[in-house]
Image (cartoon, helix red, strand yellow):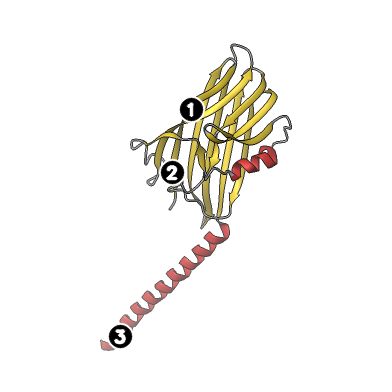
Amino acid sequence: MKTHYKIGVGLVLLIIISAGLLSFWWQDQKQKMYNSSLRSSYDYDVILTTDSTLSNVTLYLPIPVINNTSSVGMDIVEHNFNNDDPSWEYALVDTEHGLMLSMKNEKARSIDLSTMVLSNQTINTITPIGNEMVLMPKYNLTHNSNASGAYSRTSEQFDYESRMYAYYETSSNANVSISIYLNARNEWWIGGWQYNSYWEDMEIKLSGPHAGWTTVNGELVTGEGTY
């Protein structure tokens, strides 16, 4: 009986040690897969929708900003939103509401513009305000406790007001909308793709010709995905 007992105890210990080694090996493999596949990026989209031709267009739009700089904005100026339409002129301008994206065109119709800028470090998607680029300006930022947790267990929603400037000439019955969307995310592969992110969007709807600043409501959702 004692021999059988010793063999049983030895077998249990062997299983425990093997399980520990296997767990250690798997954690190491997961870390290697994470490190080799991790990609962090900022996706920024501007959608202009109109049912009429717009003339002499000037737009000042919120862009992702931190410390009054915007790598996304600089990429747009250098690469024209990765778009082959040469009619648009882009610039970063300091306005009364801070650094914004300037878009100018003599004649404009509906267009969907987007760009993706890679980050050389993991993006803080839990607390991006003050730590990462977010759409600016932001006024009256409030935590929406009723909407928090709607997208994932860790998600939080914040509502705010921003500003857009639009000048253009068009028919009196023209309908125009301008939408902006930002998605900042980390994504990696461990037996399947996983991610976490923060994102925000805003939209204004205008009618007829326009000249001036407009208040626009925006929302920021942080902490979405896997952590």
Q: Residue at x 59, y 33 (%)?
A: 46
Q: Which mark is residue 216?
A: 1
Q: Position of residue 154 (x, y in %)?
A: 38, 47
Q: Name the residue located 65 percent from the left edge and 40 percent from the top edge.
A: 76
> Which residue does the image show at 43% across and 48% down from the upper left?
126
Instruction: Indicate which disc, 3 or 1, sits on the residue closer to the N terminus.
Output: 3
Percent of width and height locating residue 34: 52, 59
Mark whose residue sits in front, 3 or 1: 1
Q: Amino acid at mark 3?
A: Lys
Q: Give the spatial CA distance, label 3 vs label 1.
A: 75 Å
| Measured Cα–Cα span from mark 1 to mark 2 | 20 Å
Q: Check whether the beta carbons of the residues at disc 2 and disc 3 lie within 8 A of each other.
A: no
Q: Secondary structure at mark 3?
A: helix
**Which of 28 and 71 lies nearest the eye of the viewer?**
71
Mark found first going from the N terminus, 2 or 3? 3
Image position of 99 (left or right of 147): right
Q: Which mark is residue 225?
A: none
Q: Nearer the viewer, residue 118 or 164?
A: 164
Q: In the rendered structure, which amino acid carries the disc numbered 2?
A: Thr
Q: Which residue is drawn at the image coordinates 48% and 27% (left, top)? A: 216
10 Å crowding of disc 2: few (<14), some (14-19), many (20+): many
Spot the residue most to the top.
172
State the image coordinates of residue 54 (x, y, percent, origin top left). Answer: 65, 20
Quadrant of the rendered structure where residue 3 is? bottom left
Using the image, tell me which numbered label, if any, was put on residue 6.
3
Q: Is residue 187 above or below residue 176?
A: below
Is residue 82 among what the camera can see?
no
Q: Return the mark for residue 222.
A: 2
Residue 89 falls left or right of residue 148: right
